[in-house]
Amino acid sequence: MIINTALLIYQLTCKSCRSGNSNEEIIGGDKDAGGCLIAAGYSWCEIKQKCLRTWEEKCELTPSPTPNFVKTGNLVATAINGKTDEGWSLLYEEPGKPALKVSLIFSNESMCDQGSGNQPCLILSSLSIGERIKVEGIQAEGVNQVLVIQMTRVK
């Protein structure tokens, strides 16, 4: 009973407790120069421009794979399950062959330049059917799909 009364008196008289403004440092709230919470194991990665835990993700750039598919052609809509707005393909030519078509697969790392510099392809919605583009990507042998690394509008 005496302890409860003492606690009540402390809470009623403590200004910093009532206002929530305490000059006391919060334990475990330290942040590094990048604003990352040190106690949670985060540190700032300058290369990736984000906080990360180095045992979960390395603070280094992932080398870009070397493209084995580099072609210029026209962008066409891909029909999947009867729906024409489901994806994109590249219609291109090679000497001595009829027109060839390959499906384009976009990832978070796919970059597109439509005249205003590189941007992630997944956020672009201004692609147009018939647009002339150069595609650099990776095509597995025997597969009619290309993982786009870089796509550039050709004038």
Image: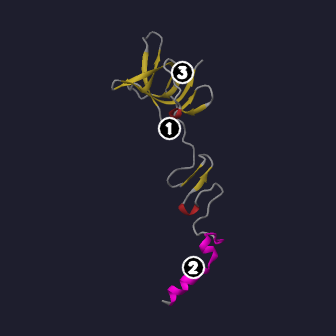
Q: Is residue 37 left or right of residue 33?
A: left
User: Is 145 colored magenta in this rendering?
Assistant: no
Magenta stretch in the rendered image: 2-24
- Mark toward the start of the polypeptide (3 vs 2): 2
Q: Which label sits on residue 108?
A: 1
Q: CA distance from mark 2 to mark 1?
A: 52 Å
Q: CA distance from mark 3 to mark 2?
A: 69 Å
Which secondary structure lies at badge 3?
A: strand
> In this view of the protein, which residue sits in the foreground, 110 or 60?
110
* Residue type pointed to by label 2: Gln
Residue found 54% across the figure and 22% down from its top: 134
Which secondary structure lies at badge 2?
A: helix
CA neighbours of label 3 inside 10 A, class few (<14), some (14 to 19), many (20+): many
The location of residue 112, given as percent across then percent down, is 55, 29
Q: Which residue is mark 3?
A: 133
Q: Which label sits on residue 11?
A: 2
Q: Which quadrant of the rendered structure holds the C terminus? A: top right
